Amino acid sequence: MEKLMLYLSILISLVAFAFAGWLFLWVKRQPSDNPIIAKNGGLIRQGARTFLRKEYTVLARFALVAAVLILILLPSPIWKGNIINNVLMAVSYLMGTAFSAIAGLIGIEVATIANVKAAEAAKSGIKPSFMAGFRGGAVMGMAVVGASLLGVTIVYLLTGDATTVLGFSFGASSLAMFAKAGGGIFTKTADISADLVGKVELGIPEDDPRNPAVIADNVGDNVGDVAGMGADLFDSNVASMAAALVLAGSIDKEKFGTNISMVFCFAALGLLASVIGVMTARIGKKGSPTRALNSSTYVTTGVYIVLTAAATAIFKFNWRIWLACIVGLLVGVVIGITTDYFTDDKKKPVKMVAKASGIGPAFTILSGISYGLLSVLPAMLGIGVSALAAYKLCESIDPALALEYSMFGISMAAVGMLSIVGMIVSNDAYGPIVDNARGLAEMGNLGEDVIEITDELDSAGNTVKAVTKGFAISAAGLTVISLLGAFMSEVNIAAAELGIKGIENFDIMNPLVFFGLLIGAAIPAVFSAMLILGVDRNAQRLVAEIHRQFREIVGLKEGKEGVEPEYDKCITIATTGAMKELIPAGLTAIIATLVVGFVGGVQAIGGFLCGNIISGLLLALFMSNSGGLWDNSKKYVEAGNEGGKGSPAHKAAVVGDTVGDPFKDTAGPSINTQITVVSLVASLMSTLFLTLSLFG
Amino acid sequence: MEKLMLYLSILISLVAFAFAGWLFLWVKRQPSDNPIIAKNGGLIRQGARTFLRKEYTVLARFALVAAVLILILLPSPIWKGNIINNVLMAVSYLMGTAFSAIAGLIGIEVATIANVKAAEAAKSGIKPSFMAGFRGGAVMGMAVVGASLLGVTIVYLLTGDATTVLGFSFGASSLAMFAKAGGGIFTKTADISADLVGKVELGIPEDDPRNPAVIADNVGDNVGDVAGMGADLFDSNVASMAAALVLAGSIDKEKFGTNISMVFCFAALGLLASVIGVMTARIGKKGSPTRALNSSTYVTTGVYIVLTAAATAIFKFNWRIWLACIVGLLVGVVIGITTDYFTDDKKKPVKMVAKASGIGPAFTILSGISYGLLSVLPAMLGIGVSALAAYKLCESIDPALALEYSMFGISMAAVGMLSIVGMIVSNDAYGPIVDNARGLAEMGNLGEDVIEITDELDSAGNTVKAVTKGFAISAAGLTVISLLGAFMSEVNIAAAELGIKGIENFDIMNPLVFFGLLIGAAIPAVFSAMLILGVDRNAQRLVAEIHRQFREIVGLKEGKEGVEPEYDKCITIATTGAMKELIPAGLTAIIATLVVGFVGGVQAIGGFLCGNIISGLLLALFMSNSGGLWDNSKKYVEAGNEGGKGSPAHKAAVVGDTVGDPFKDTAGPSINTQITVVSLVASLMSTLFLTLSLFG
């Protein structure tokens, strides 16, 4: 097959970009004429750009420092190895950050147009409004998967080296950490501060334009959920491909062998399936948006199974590996559905938390935490079962390469789980677009009927979001398991080059491994705590600024004609603060990896990564699910249950929702990116950890 | 040395019992004459007895079923192995439950006398009141350690078999799970229900005798903190000895070899050091009770170091193992001190949480959770460092037995950490005694001065409690690491008997191990969630009963002379409910172990135990510390900070405290017992898992 698959990958990425371009133009063509919506929409777009500019500036500095370190130290120290490898690695790293950043930019640009279009389209009914929101989101979906596939393919085509792809992946995950954690701090800072001063202190409504933080709040939805989630899944998608390539490379002798081709082929077909899934998304005049979103996901899944089976038959790939891939995909869907159980307002957990809220806020918290902890089990079980099944399916392919094939099987299960990522990102980006559309419709006084339509679209977005979040975390979980395999493979390549003994296992009974396990498990706890405390500190700064504006800008509080708050100052403060709070948390994770590696060597790092994955998955699932649960319980009470709006149960449910906000939008989903960053740092540093460590 | 050390152990246990008897008589001799206190004290004692009777009845049924299963199945299935072994194992198991139960009974009897004495003694000043509280607690401390040492020694002396000691340990941990989790559900049920109806609905004060749940609330302190914590540390102490004996047995050829002798010797010296520590506890007329409690802990530590060094020199034990033991002890003390940082009201976390409470309850929760998550790191680091140090110290003792010696080193570090457990239990049981004394002083109208004294004693109890909780969790952590080693050793003994290949490692890259890791990590989350939800459900039942009494008993609400609520009904309902809620949680953990074992075999169980330890430690530390933090933040606000009592900050801090209650007193510390139960089930079932499993 030689390079056929790589060219095919590039071709399909370009198809995805072309499709994204068509969708973009379609969205842009939709009518809009309301001047208030246009103005506010413009402010949101400006704000989002301000945030991204600032974020990318800080990131660029970080990335440059990292690139220089990579140039000097990796894959081997420059004074020991081949300088060309180091240059390629540094360039590949920078490409990873750049490709992810470009996908994020595209997504934000279209999302901040689509929100206006969806708001205005709601005047003509649910169908056009849904299509504007969904197609706007789909641009992001196509851009994310297109860019990740294109990037990985180019790097591999130019270097033929899977390790260099890990560098690209590290670039993607550095950006994801900034985008997800930084965006997460920004969005919750703005949300909490706007509510605290607006709703609580002054008693003005949610999206009141007098509130200086109102635009920042709307910007937050976009940078957190569109750019952040996009970068997160870009990261997972690239990491799953990178790990699969490293592990395929441990089997294939040639650079374009069967298994390597299979990785590209299956990733490309996932993108193709997503394109088809997006194209089939339709909603009847009175149809349900939730059903439309879900059915296009199922279409994508079905198409993917058929396409990969055909490819396996045509290109004579191994059927067992195909099956491992499909197991991953199906388990991903099942995990999504079980996550839904814990956050669906028709199911027991949401109702019980709403009921507990009647007793008081402490019971809202206790029951929400309890169900959040319970929700961990099905996902962990699913990840465990799919990894075990993939391993067992593939270990018998070649007895001489049992470990290699079985680890490759796991990595292909992760590729399978992530194959529908284009669809997932589309659905996810749809959420903030219609959420914004609802706000804009309210600001533009489009009337009750229109708001009712946007409300329905928004509610579908929330339901789907909970499912995609569970999916994203599980996919990251399976990906990092294969990254652990990639780490071991990297260590052995390095050991072979150095002529020293490689490693055969990470034994729990080895105290270095156990030491690493304990520290690795503590890091996600510390990381998420630092982010939550960061939101808190940042919100204090922003509240002070809002107070200042209400105090100093004459006529603002009274809503005097022509008087406007300084929206941009709030955005700047929230942005600067978010970056300031993010960096110590990110560095803590990276420095802990280095300390453990240089103290305990590769064995300790093996344990460290494992502990990090285990506790990271636990905390990420717990936080995301309990956050979603509290959010929906509050909405359930607001819908008139347990006393409805203004009742004691409602007040308690609001407390739950406020606790849940940084759980589900800041800390929980950022843990994903922390795990991949740490895993990739470990893989890239493997040579150094192997040669320079205190006890290893 | 032959059996010298075993006779010495028995002798020292008897000394401890004699000392406990002397302390008991001393406490009983203290004067008391207030009839109201006598009456209420009697009610508390009766209530505690009711709870224990019910608990022990349920436990007895559980233990009988377990003993029958052991008789049929363990160590080998009765139709394959030697029936004598199975009988010994079943008897040893029952002894484990009985010894622990007796220690609990003794502790409760004296604690419910000492609370009355401490209340009355406060009339003569802080010194006699402190002594009554402390010596009352010390009876429990001596009984716990005396019974655990005596039981282990008798079992080993009779059978000469370390595996049978694991059976004794399993008995102790079954009881601990009931005592800790059941007592934890009981105490929080009573606490929350009494507060909800009394303080919130009716606005009557905390310890008002009209409240039907007031006695249950006071009983709860005793059964949760005296009996529960005692059983928990009895369990850890026995488990650390059992694991050390199994691992020493893998080195020593004879049944009374040097290393086995060392285990008994060092455990006995720990008890002796605690006796000396208790004897030196003194407080000046105006002295600080906190300092008195801490200084006697330091005395115990110092005495232990000297005694064990002398023993090592005299009996020619290995100095490296001695050092491993001392490292464990010192790290335990350091972990206690860092835990204190997170819960001390003079340090940043408590102050920051109190400040955050000014913004609203959501911020109390968010900041408390964040600091709770941060607090995990030092303890995990400490456990990791001590395990690593012990391993590295001991692996070079005999190159042919490197793994055996290093695992034995870790188990001796656990023995070292637990050597001061007599002192720890004494300090811990002191807390509820003086807490009750405060309540009794209030009920008996002993006046402001007396209440001030009991307040000071109570506050010292709270400070020390936070430290001992961190210590208990860490000690359990180190113990279960050595239990993991014991499990491996058991598997290999079984494999040798069956003539099949044993295991050399638990490799993280083995998918069975990884599968086990994921499931094992989810179990503590599920277990703690079930307990918290259990408290919630149980509280609803009790609230209904309190409402019924206020409705049906004429004159109760008005406080009519001679009208009394039916205290015992509340106690019965809380007790029955606690047992009902506990059993599914406990069974879930045990059944998960069996399923994983029979599906994935011993490799999966290795991973399962490891995942269980890691996530169990994480959640236990997080929950205990954030719970303690919220409790002290509330007290800090009540002391007049951030607006003081009745301020919005106070209301928010109360929400935090209510969330923290089941965290720190139900779920958090029960996770310990869940981990040991699961570890011991795994060790005892090793033969079955080895021979009967789907994939193993």
Image: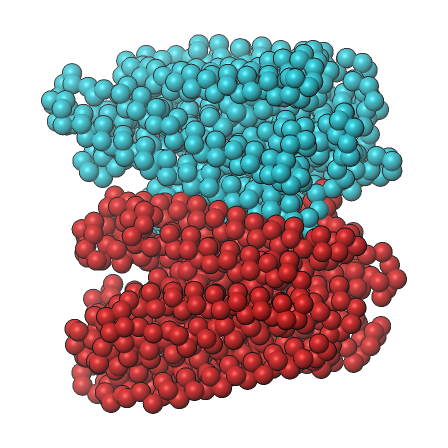
Chain colours: A cyan, B red
Q: Is residue B276 above or below residue A502?
A: below
Q: Position of residue B105 (x, y in %)?
A: 48, 82
Along the line of sight, which residue is nearer the eye, B117 or B2? Answer: B2
Q: Position of residue A567 (x, y in %)?
A: 26, 21
Left or right: B605 with respect to A591? right
Count the marks: how many?
A: 0
Q: Nearer the viewer, residue B163 or A419?
A: B163
- Report the front residue among A431 and B331: B331
Q: Residue at x 45, y 87 (%)?
A: B21
Q: Is residue A388 visible?
A: no
Indicate the quadrant containing the C terminus of chain A: top left, top right, bottom left or bottom right. top right
Residue A483, quarter of the rendered image: top right
- State the residue at coordinates (18%, 79%): B445
Quadrant hosting residue B588? bottom right
- Answer left or right for B20 relative to B543: right
**Could you say where residue A421 lies in the image, as x and y percent from the top left?**
59, 27
For the N terminus of chain A, which image quadrant?
A: top right
Quick check: B246 left or right of B172?
Answer: right
- Residue B8 visible, this orientation: yes
Taking the spot 65% from the left edge, 28% from the top edge, the residue there is A688
Residue plotted at (82% across, 19% down):
A254
In the rendered image, residue A385, in percent from the top left (x then y), is placed at 69, 45
